[in-house]
Amino acid sequence: MKTTSHKTSEQNESVQKRLLSLFGSPLKHYAWAVLSVSIITVIGEILTPHLDLINIVLLFLLPVLISAVRWGRGPSFLSSFMGVLTFNFFFVPPIFTFAVGNTQHLFVLVVFFLVALVTSTTATKLRNELEKATEREIRTLTLYELSREIAAKADLEQVLKTFLDKVAETINGTAVVLIQDPNNEILYKMAATLDNAVFDEKEYAVARWVLEHGQPAGKELGIFEGARSLFFFPIKAEDKTIAVLGIRPNIESAALSPEKQQLIETFANLVAVAIIRLQLAKEAEQAKWLAESEKLHRILLNSISHDFRTPLASITGAVTSLLVEGSVYTQETKDIFLHTIREEAHRMNRFVENLLDMVRLESGALKLNMKWCDIEDIIGVVLRETRDALQEHPLQIDILPDPPSFMADFILIEHVIINLLENAVKYSLPGSSISISAHCQDRTLLLTVADPGPPIPKTEQEHVFDKFYRLHSSKHTSGTGLGLSICKGIIDAHGGSIWVDSSPEYGNRFTFSLPVPEELSELTQTREGTDNVG
Amino acid sequence: MSADGARVLVVDDEKQIRRMLRAALEGYGYNVGEAASGHEGLGQTSIFHPDLIILDLGLPDLDGIEVIGRLREWTQVPIIVLSVREHEDDKIKALDAGADDYVTKPFSMGELLARLRTALRHAAKLEDTPILTFGELSVDLAYRKVTIRGEEIKLTPTEYEVLKYLAQQAGRVVTHRQLLRAIWGSNYQEESQYLRVYIGQLRRKIEADPSQPTYIITEPGVGYRLITRDY
């Protein structure tokens, strides 16, 4: 019941609309035309004593012009007719008759009528063109807005969402984009303005047809005559339909005007370009990533073969010497062989540790095991680990009294300090002193490892933390150039920073900083309070 | 060195490791048995009757943690776990499952032998003496007295409890959880920041240089160990 009553009222409205208009202009506009001619007649009556008849007739061109510009062709024609008649009736002698006294007046009337007609036709045409231009401008603006919004979006989902919102706004309804799963035949919904925009079997079949044939379908567009208003447009790029746009106006059984259809097709072209652009960007990124990882693999393989083989060569050499039958070596020499084996095995183990750290950092699989740590404790563990490597270097340790605790992954920070120490050992002469110092500044913990080695040139300072970077002056030193890049990766992951400053006076100072959060000091304080020395 | 003929079962799938361990351990007078898989290890335990098991955590057939669990269902034989450095979680799991200690691959033989002796000693419960001495540190359990380099030091009750627990387990790793449970009770077993604070205080009282501790050492990510003169 409700729907039928709604329908009849809608029909009534449209009938009324049709009745109220004549030649495309509403009756109201004709009334305005009549009124304007009447006003001019009154003004003419007032001015007659002061003006010639020829000047009065010019006044009557005003309503014609106004009608043409404001109310369209019908009202302006009406103004012309009425103008001729009223002028003739009220102003051309004999007054108050439609008769015309002399030929001169007849000539004036005829010329006025012709001028009025030409004016109204031209003005109407101008008005129509203006309307069209405005409409075109709006359309261009909409397109421009859409293209700008789409260009700003970096992922497909957002692009489609913007596009669908625009389409939905234009047609006053809902819209959906369907894309074919590359692995099977199923069309699935990629994006929609309404989540519940569901199609029945038949409608899906039409969408598939649109995808396969690359032609729009829907009411009055071809092949499809559904009960509900539904239109499908292909989204084409380079002659290939990559997706289907489905739209459903809110008003049932509504048709789509050619202008709207054209606009939507333009939208679809625009979004197709955007989709292709995103696909290309993705491919370019993948290609770049591939090239980078290929380069990484190559360097990694080179370094693995070098850094594993060097210690292996020492070990093999030492062991085979020891295994030679009837050995000529003294116990002292044998000890040298054995120490070589131990040191080289240790070096290989460190190398494996660094490789593992690097792989974890690279793959993003690095999980920080954040715990409260004491810098003194970590340094203690580091020194135990590096005892052998640091044998030839006097060590200075300077830790501020009562260092603050901080949140960090104990083992990874340990790796950082070990790497910094091994770096210091590698680049400084035996016997030179290496120092570790820890300080705290504005809730930041600063740890510095300093060595008196040759200072790193300014230009190379920022590169020493790059992966596989080796100093130009130290090509002969063994190592992968992994250590410092791992340090940087780990410190970055902790939200800290790492840097080096060098000078001929003090050599190189590698420093990293870590944030120190407010400690849960009340916890330890309350415990201490009840836990007196007894 | 101790040629007590203790029976050690080595469970490792790597033949080279087994061969090396057999040679080294037999050199020190141990009686060595071998198993190449978890199942074989479980079987050998009931046949070989080892006094100690060296168990690799990365076995091909059974998870090392599971092997420990199954063994602990019926035997308290000491287990020393072989693990790699990167897997702290595995070490903690193994220790919580009932392993006695661990060594990290690659390990030095001296380190392994020290762990072995400590574990065997604890299993034999030979340490019921009231005074525990480690180098210049001694802990008198009867009088709650701690001396370092001949001088008595004052400890708070909690510091004393921490040191006592570590001293009673001397040479063995003690996990954070074990220490917390023993001293504060099971409600506090996740609060490792307590420990950090007390260990720091203890070190300042005991160690000559707290940044290079010689008594209480940190096992990163796992716990602490009071080291004996063994290594």
Image (spheres, rainbow, N blue to C red):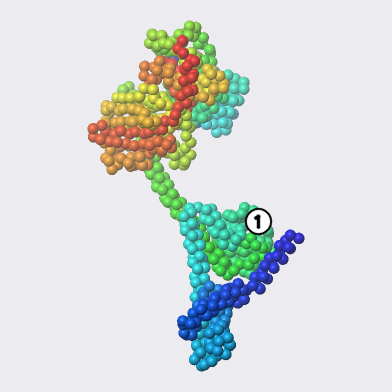
Query: Residue A22, image x and y in percent?
Result: 62, 76
* Closer to the camera in the image, B224 or B29: B224
Q: Quadrant of residue A202?
A: bottom right
Identify the residue at horizontal 43%, vertical 35% (top origin): A494
A12 with respect to A447 (left or right):
right
Seen from this angle, which residue lies furthest bottom?
A: A103
Q: Is residue B191 left or right of residue A404?
A: right
Q: Residue at x 50, y 11 (%)?
A: B127
Left or right, A521 with reference to A14: left
> Secondary structure under badge 1?
loop
Q: From the viewer's perspective, is residue B16 above or below residue A284?
A: above
Chain letter of the residue carrying label 1? A
Query: Which residue lies under the disc numbered 1?
Result: A198
Place of residue A6 in the rendered image (x, y in percent of width and height, measured from the top left): 71, 62
Q: Amino acid at mark 1?
A: Val
Q: Relative to the observer, which residue lies in front, A275 or B73?
A: A275
Compared with B118, A178 (above or below) is below
